Image (cartoon, rainbow, N blue to C red):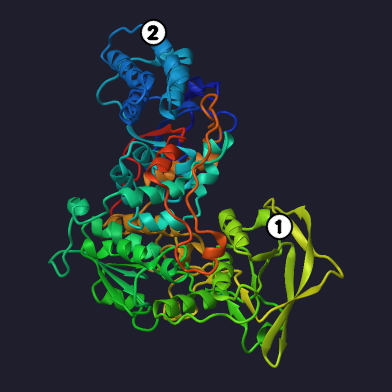
Amino acid sequence: MVQALQYGVWLDQTVDHRPAGGGPLPAGLSTERLPKTGDGNPLLGLVAPQGFLVFDAKLPLLKLMLDYWRRVTALSCGRCTPCRAGTLEVLDALETLREGGAVDWAALEATLEDMSRTSLCGIGIASPEPLLAALRRFRSDLLPYSDDAPGVLFADATAPCIEACPAHVNIPRYIDGVRDGRADISEAVLLDHYPLVASCGRVCVRPCESACVRGRVDRAIAIRDLKRAAAAAAPGAGPEYFACAKKAPRGADGRARVAVVGAGPAGLNCAYHLLRRGVSVDVFEMEAAAGGMARYGIPAYRLPNAILEKEASTVETLGGRFLFGRRLGRDFTTSSLLAQGYEAVFLGIGCGIGKPMGVAGEEKAVSGVLKGLDFLLPLARRQEAGEAEPLEGDTVVVGCGNVAMDCCRSARRLSSPEAKVTVVYRRTRASAPADPEEIDAALEERVGFEFLTNPVEILTEAGRVVGVKVVRMAEGAPDTSGRRSVKPVAGSEFVIPCSRVIGAIGQAVDPTSIAGEEALKMTRWGTIETNAAMATSIDRVFAGGDAAAGPATLILAMAEGERAAQSIAARLEGLRPVESPREALSNWILGEGLLGHCVPPRPTPEAPRSKAPHLAPDVRARSWDEAEGTLSKSAAEREASRCLRCYRVFALETLAPVGAREKI
């Protein structure tokens, strides 16, 4: 709920609509993208590194600044004198004004300017700006106010890496822990969001690193490698870590019970957060072990099962129960679970089937044509049973996403040294959705790549694949999304001889798992339709991860599991699930590009990025042992010291707490 703007300063634009009773936002800001604070809970004011805006004339400017500065002071780490001493001096001055006393305005400005100029992290560098704007443009409005003045502040410190992370993990904080030799602190920061710390430290696709400001100096911080290093050095999340969690023994009278369907990353994290809230949880899983696609879709050379198993067992440590060999659509439905007394159901069933390539000749092949998951999932099960068999002949993998990389690198390990493994992709390497480091690793392992090449026909003899006819592609003009189109080059067809073709072009929800769920609305992409609170079209049924978002990433699946747990917990309390305050703030920050101004704070000397050890390419191409190692303690500490701590503090002042939920 947004009121008309009264006055403020934004990016050096001074706006004062008070004579007219309110007016438009400064240029460059959109009313539609302002944070959603809930019906009946108007946005009274906001503060950001870009300035401040007051939407309600009853909100005292001094209250807005004092509330903000109290939060800034609490967030200051105290490592550098300008911020440690400066925040306290500024807070003391604002408290003096609040009590009707006099302050030295020139001294206050000087303190703020010194903080901005000499602090060592973004909190001290950027937080003075809105108060400086108020001092210089609206000093006469910094007046004492009564105790009944309206306004409740919600504020948080964020950074480009944090906003790029779907789980909004406080990345600079856990990097601080590594730098200071306090892996236990790093682990605690991560465990606040998910239990799969070491697993994520191996296979996360690192959206945070793409946003890292350090990349404008030399290279981005090795954030994923530091997470893995922290997990390796930390003592681990034993029962004592969760002593503060409300244990929820099964069968206890009055305990809410929730069914989680699917023990993949989304389901595990949903169960984890519900258990920490004291909810009793049963996890239904169709396989014989927990992990979902993280276990069966990611090869062992990237993520060993023992690591995933240990972290998944946290659900049992917290009092949850796994029910293996139980499949949605075969053994139960959402309605049967609700009828059994579960008060809510979470669907984390993933996207368990591959999509066909739609290439001529595909349907004629009796053997030799596989979808990516049809190759990876049986391989994982055979390896667990010690029955993996070598591949005969050459292999072509179609597609260049992360599943395609898992397919081609696995095929390389199963094939003889003289056999060829080739990836065919219709676009350029720069357009490939796979992690660039995965493509590098595949090239080092002698996987061939044919970029700007597209399959047009699967060639067979007596029902067996003997090759794939492909055509060269040429790039055209960018489409509406900015991605360049591609089209076939006439007369450029050629044949790649092979014994098998693996199509890794996407996955979908298995329709047999939702066959009995007629009331469950699906999107046009074949995923489960959910709202911002992860609720589905069926009352008390929630969904998340690949089943809702489409084939994505482990970190996104875990983030949606956590978000669903928050919504389920609210629903169990009889409250209407709504978007969380943190998500409302994040959507505004990202929608307006408010972190785009983050730059290295001052001339920063280049420092080489630490590189994790790897098995030699010729060794790992023949081995299922883990291909990548962990940074040493000294290398991890050096790498952590490269972090620029690009924090920025954003705050909303509202009539009632943001995210306050209505009774259903």
Q: Amino acid at mark 2?
A: Ala
Residue 510, position as x, y percentages in the image: 49, 76
259 lies left or right of 618 = left
Residue 631, position as x, y percentages in the image: 42, 48
Residue 382, position as x, y percentages in the image: 44, 80
Disc 1 packing (10 Å; few <14; some 14–19; many ≥20): some
Q: Which is more toward the observer, 113 or 36?
A: 113
Q: Is residue 280 visible?
A: no
Q: Earlier in the sequence, mark 1 or mark 2?
A: 2
- Quadrant, the N terminus: top left
What residue is at 16 percent from the left and 65 percent from the top? 249
471 lies left or right of 354 = right
Q: Which is more toward the observer, 5 or 292?
A: 292
Residue 359, position as x, y percentages in the image: 70, 77
| Residue that numbered label 2 is attached to | 107
**Residue 246: image tag:** none
* As drawn, 183 above or below 594: below
Q: Amino acid at mark 1?
A: Thr
Kindly state the secondary structure of the residue where label 2 is placed: helix
**Residue 428: image tag:** 1
Kindly state the secondary structure of the residue where label 1 is placed: loop
* As drawn, 208 above or below 295: above
Q: Quadrant of residue 569?
A: bottom left
